[in-house]
Amino acid sequence: MNYQTKSAITSIKRFPFQALAAIFLLTVTFLVVTILSVVTYSSSKVIKYFETRPQVIAFLKDSATAETISALQHKLQNDARIKEVKYVSKEEALSIYKDATVDNPLLGELVNPSIFPASLEFSLSDLSRAQAVIEEVKTEAIVDSVGFTASLGGEKTLGDVVNRLRSITLYLKLGGGFFALLLVGTSFLVLVVTLGMRIASRRQEVEILNLIGAKKSFIKKPIVIESIIYVLIGVALGWLITLIVILYIAPSAINYFGEIPILPRDPLMFFSLFGIILLAEAVTGILLATLGSNLALSRAGRKK
Amino acid sequence: MIKFNKVTKTYGEVCALKDVSFEVKDGEFVFLMGPSGAGKTTILKLILKEIFSDTGEIHVGGVDVSKISEKDLPGFRQKVGCVFQDFKLLNERTAYENLEIALAILGIPEPKWKERIDKVLKMVGLQDRKNLFPSQLSGGEIQRASLARALVVNPDLILADEPTGNLDWEKAYEIMEVLEKINKEGKCVIVATHNKEIVGKMKKRVIKLTSGKIISALNKTPDSKS
């Protein structure tokens, strides 16, 4: 261990309450950062869920042939506004119906595939274009009718559904962006203030070291190392507390949201997500600590 | 070693030094003597480039101090051992650690520290106080710790600002003996003091100052040929 690292550790040991105050503030900051990271992940999953589930179903006429269906499917796939086009045959439609009525097998037995129309299901890259796309698809010769499935309940018209989904998506994106910005700004300020507090108490030391011939890098290094130690402990504690809380509430949350994948269900994916968050926080924390301690040091230098 | 040529320094409207010129040769032991406010500390601060002169030239070791860049200043200061009037010990570190950091700044390998530090602490009589913090040391012990830090880096030039200020006669004389011993090893020593007894006892070259002006024994050492 080099002299500067030893010096940083000695400084932490000799002023445990200052160190604890700094670590506590940083732990709270990174606790909030971790929670919001998970919320951001879940929000993105909710948005993706609504964006990728089949939103539009074009029911096909019985007269549609395999060639005309294939031609329409190909046409839709080439439309930039449309994604994930899927053909559902009469048999598949019956199978879906039977799955949906599994609690009441009698309902399934009373029907045969011929009463279910084949369909083309697809989602839209942008919900605002739903109305136009549906109107166009309705004009296709083999299309009998078009249904829109993305209703969240309560909407009377397609316009209402689209508006509601667009509002939710917009709020999630705006809210996420705002919180992310707020958080980065707050984290940086907390870091600069916390580190500034430590450096202010060491201003005399900085002056003395200057007078006895210490280079700037020699003076900075232990302070930066000390800041990085605080940040890494803050990151680890904030992350660990969030992980424990999420592990505790995950079963209820996953159950509540049903098929919307707000959190990865595979343990490996779940811990990978948290691993990525930890790594990102550690890297961001080290960058902020280096930047923050340099800024706090230059401020201390100006106040001489 | 040191050359002041018509150096003037003012603090606002107060003139600390006015047209001061003198020379100190390599290996010399010089007292800067005078009452408080005479300009002794200002001279030492100018040598260390802690402050800047208004006019005049200052050369240390053949280098024009005003031309030392910010980047080269640490290297310049590493060659000067300084005992500050207010000691300037690091209060968060023990006496031993204060000496360690001076060696770390010089980039001396850690295995060599202990031997050098123990030798210097023994020289100033602080070996049994080395693990105490400055707040746990007496005024005299702090002064000796400050001297030890200046000596441990084995500098070519030692500046001491009132190094006997808090010491009784016996301890003050011991400190002077240490400085004399260092001087005999070829180091240049400049001591700012108002202690006439010490100056009288040491029988070294004296530069007397009052109100920022040199008033006697100015530019010539006792054995100077010029």
Image (spheres, coloured by chain):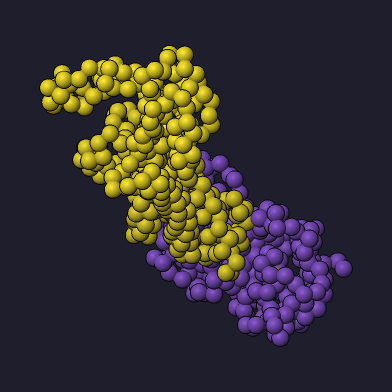
Chain colours: A yellow, B purple
To which quarter of the image does residue A92 belong?
A: top left
Give x and y (percent) for residue B212. Answer: 73, 81
Residue A224 seen in render? yes
State left or right for residue B10 relative to residue A37.
Answer: right
Give x and y (percent) for residue B198. Answer: 60, 74
Give x and y (percent) for residue A257. Answer: 26, 40
State left or right for residue B86 relative to residue B69.
Answer: left
Quadrant of the snapshot with the C terminus of chain A: bottom right
Question: Which residue: 53% across, 29% down?
Answer: A79
Question: Which residue: 74% across, 57% down?
Answer: B69
Question: Which residue: 70% across, 72% down?
Answer: B43
Question: Which residue: 38% across, 22% down?
Answer: A61
- Indicate whether B135 appears above or below A274: below
Q: Nearest the camera: A233 or A249?
A: A249
- How many circles with numbers are drawn on the protein? 0
Q: Nearest the camera: A195 or A35?
A: A35
Q: Nearest the camera: A261 or B142?
A: A261
Give x and y (percent) for residue A162. Answer: 40, 45
State left or right for residue B49 relative to residue A120.
Answer: right
Residue B99 seen in render? no
Q: Nearest the camera: A115 or B42?
A: A115
- Indicate whether A166 appears above or below A198: above
Q: Residue furthest right?
A: B226
